[in-house]
């Protein structure tokens, strides 16, 4: 049950604190006074999308705080447990919106996502406009299911459907794989032979890249050594030194010191150059095959990468892909057996779903009859004595089965005597739709756990006896759930347990919305205004007292 609503700096509301009680509360006021703003604030607290334009002009942020006391907290506590939020006697939702458009949401001072807030709001409070969801056929099944009081059966159907769909997915994947194997068996054999010839290894690409980097440094060394070797060996250097040395050796012995020195130097030079040629020759022999090795590495890398592109896998995954090809070809028979087995499993799961779906179908048919009987009693109370309501529960084709079962539920109505039953969304007028929704909510009130329902101008377009009937039915509904009704009807307001007046006042250079809970004396005045308009007459006051005493 909603117990309080605090609003700060929201649209034209500066500061507002409201306390709510059980029973029926009516909110009245002139058109444009701000009743819809209160609904927007409450909707925002329950997960409605925020907008920077909602922040009051000149303020930094809007703050909306809604507090609830839980009548039956089972579902709510499950949601809180999922978010690791402790359970408390009251549940406080706080929503903040900054002037930049950013926002935050808290539940019992724990920050939560807007998605969770919306999910929580769905089990705390329901807001209905004039036409509500009755125009959407898909909502009819949900409304009937709310009357079933069999959540375990609905949950069983959903679980069976999900199990069936999971099995169906497994079967389809296996069947597609088997079909692929059958259609591509020859090609798979060709791929296998090609990859076995290549024989890729895991991690081979990285090893080749590392080896290539190590060898690439030898390229420059190879060129330099080759050049030095060729210069010393094929040039005239060594031969000239040897010829000069032999020529000096042929000279007769002399005491010329220069000749002796030159002979010794040439001997050393010949020896050193010969050693240098030998060293270069040995080194050249060692690195002579490096370019060939580098080319081999490049060729291997190119072959691996080409295979990777061809098979659309990473080079490092080629070895795994090769093993998969072997397994695919080796286990073709096993794939056929597995697919056949999965097909049997999915058929069994489908049968389970159909059986529990059939149980739910029968439960819906039975409850539909009860709902129709209850509506037959309710509709005359809302001044629809000739209206007929009929719930049609029919099985749909297998292709249209869904997680809620095998049914399509549709409400048919005939609003006037002699009229044939036809789809509700094509027959009822706006005012009639509003009363139909109220009749449904009144019928469902004893079976659902939703603690609070808000009706936004459900009495629009009606007056007199019809409005009085709506007020009486709202009051009866409020015996089971908390009801807030935004209304322009004095008959509905008079039927309420609590009356709130929404006013828009001119405060300096801005307009401001205020809300006041009316004591009995002021309720007379407000009802008189609603009855007579701008000028409140004594006759209107007398009629207001009479109207209020009728419901009091």
Image: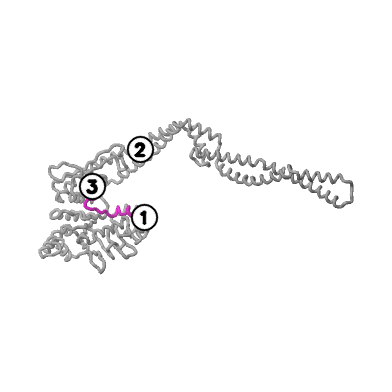
Most extreme residue toward the bottom is 508
Q: Position of residue 502 (x, y in %)?
A: 22, 62
Mark 2 to mark 3 CA distance (whole Å): 35 Å
118 falls in the magenta region: yes
Q: Which residue is mark 1?
A: 113
Q: Which picture quadrant has residue 236?
A: top right
Nearer the N terminus, badge 1 or badge 2?
1
Mark 3 to mark 1 CA distance (whole Å): 30 Å
Side (left or right) of 40 relative to 165: left
Question: Callout 3: few (<14), some (14-19), or many (20+) C-alpha neighbours within 10 Å?
Answer: some
Residue at horizontal 56 percent and vertical 42 percent from the top? 205
Question: Callout 2: few (<14), some (14-19), or many (20+) C-alpha neighbours within 10 Å?
Answer: many
Against 414, is 96 above or below?
Answer: below
215 falls in the magenta region: no
Q: Which picture quadrant has residue 81?
A: bottom left
Secondary structure under the numbered disc 3 in the rendered image: loop
Q: Position of residue 511 (x, y in %)?
A: 25, 65
Most extreme residue toward the left is 539
Q: Which part of the image, by quadrant, shows the N terminus?
A: bottom left
Task: Indicate the colouring scheme.
Answer: one colour
Q: Nearer the viewer, residue 262 or 365?
A: 262
Q: Which mark is residue 135?
A: 3
Q: Which residues are magenta?
A: 114-136
Against 393, is 481 above or below?
Answer: below
Secondary structure under the numbered disc 1 in the rendered image: loop
**How many numbered circles are shown?**
3
Q: Which residue is mark 2?
A: 349
Mark 1 to mark 2 CA distance (whole Å): 36 Å
Question: Callout 1: few (<14), some (14-19), or many (20+) C-alpha neighbours within 10 Å?
Answer: some
Residue at horizontal 70 percent and vertical 44 percent from the top? 283
Nearer the N terminus, badge 3 or badge 1?
1
């Amino acid at each position: 049950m909603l117990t309080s609503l605090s609003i700060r700096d929201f649209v034209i509301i500066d500061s507002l604190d409201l306390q709510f009680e059980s029973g029926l509360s009516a909110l009245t006021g002139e058109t444009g006074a701000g009743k819809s703003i209160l609904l927007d604030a409450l909707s925002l607290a329950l997960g409605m999308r925020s907008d920077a334009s909602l922040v009051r002009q000149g303020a930094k942020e809007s703050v909306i705080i809604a507090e609830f006391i839980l009548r039956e907290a089972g579902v709510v506590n499950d949601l809180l447990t999922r978010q690791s939020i402790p359970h408390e006697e009251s549940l406080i939702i706080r929503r903040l919106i900054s002037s930049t458009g950013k926002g935050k949401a808290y539940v019992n001072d724990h920050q939560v996502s807007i998605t969770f807030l919306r999910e929580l709001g769905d089990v705390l409070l329901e807001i209905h406009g004039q036409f509500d969801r009755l125009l959407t056929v898909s909502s009819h099944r949900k409304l009937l299911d709310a009357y079933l009081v069999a959540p375990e059966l609905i949950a069983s159907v959903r679980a069976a459907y999900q199990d069936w769909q999971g099995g169906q997915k497994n079967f389809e994947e296996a069947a597609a794989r088997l079909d692929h194997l059958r259609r591509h068996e020859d090609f798979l054999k060709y791929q296998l032979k090609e990859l076995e010839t290549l024989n890729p290894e895991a991690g081979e690409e990285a090893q080749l890249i590392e080896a290539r980097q190590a060898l690439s440094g030898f390229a420059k060394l190879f060129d330099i050594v080759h050049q030095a070797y060729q210069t010393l060996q094929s040039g005239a250097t060594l031969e000239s030194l040897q010829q000069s040395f032999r020529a000096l050796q042929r000279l007769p012995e002399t005491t010329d010191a220069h000749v002796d020195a030159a002979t010794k130097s040439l001997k050393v030079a010949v020896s050193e150059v010969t050693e240098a040629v030998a060293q270069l020759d040995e080194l050249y022999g060692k690195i002579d095959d490096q370019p060939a090795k580098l080319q081999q590495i490049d060729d291997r890398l190119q072959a691996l990468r080409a295979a990777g592109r061809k098979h659309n896998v990473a080079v490092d995954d080629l070895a795994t892909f090769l093993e998969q090809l072997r397994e695919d070809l080796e286990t073709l028979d096993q794939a056929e057996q597995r697919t056949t087995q999965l097909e049997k499993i999915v058929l069994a799961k489908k049968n389970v779903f159909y059986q529990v779906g059939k149980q739910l179908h029968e439960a819906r048919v039975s409850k539909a009859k009860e709902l129709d009987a209850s509506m037959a009693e309710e509709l005359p109370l809302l001044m629809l004595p000739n209206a007929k309501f009929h719930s049609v529960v029919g099985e749909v084709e297998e292709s249209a089965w869904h997680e809620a079962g095998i049914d399509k539920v549709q409400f048919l109505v005939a609003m006037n005597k002699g009229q044939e039953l036809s789809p509700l969304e094509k027959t009822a007028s706006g005012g009639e739709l509003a009363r139909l929704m109220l009749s449904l909510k009144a019928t469902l009130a004893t079976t659902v756990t939703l603690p609070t329902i808000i009706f936004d101008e459900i009495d629009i377009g009606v007056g007199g006896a019809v409005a009085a009937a709506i007020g009486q039915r709202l009051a009866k509904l409020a015996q089971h759930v908390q009801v807030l009704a935004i209304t322009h009807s004095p008959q509905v307001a008079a039927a309420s347990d609590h009356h709130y007046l929404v006013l828009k006042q001119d405060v300096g250079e801005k307009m401001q919305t205020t809300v006041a809970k009316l004591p009995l004396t002021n309720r007379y005045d407000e009802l008189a205004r609603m009855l007579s308009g701008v000028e409140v007459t004594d006759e209107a006051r007398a009629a207001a007292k009479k109207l209020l005493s009728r419901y009091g």
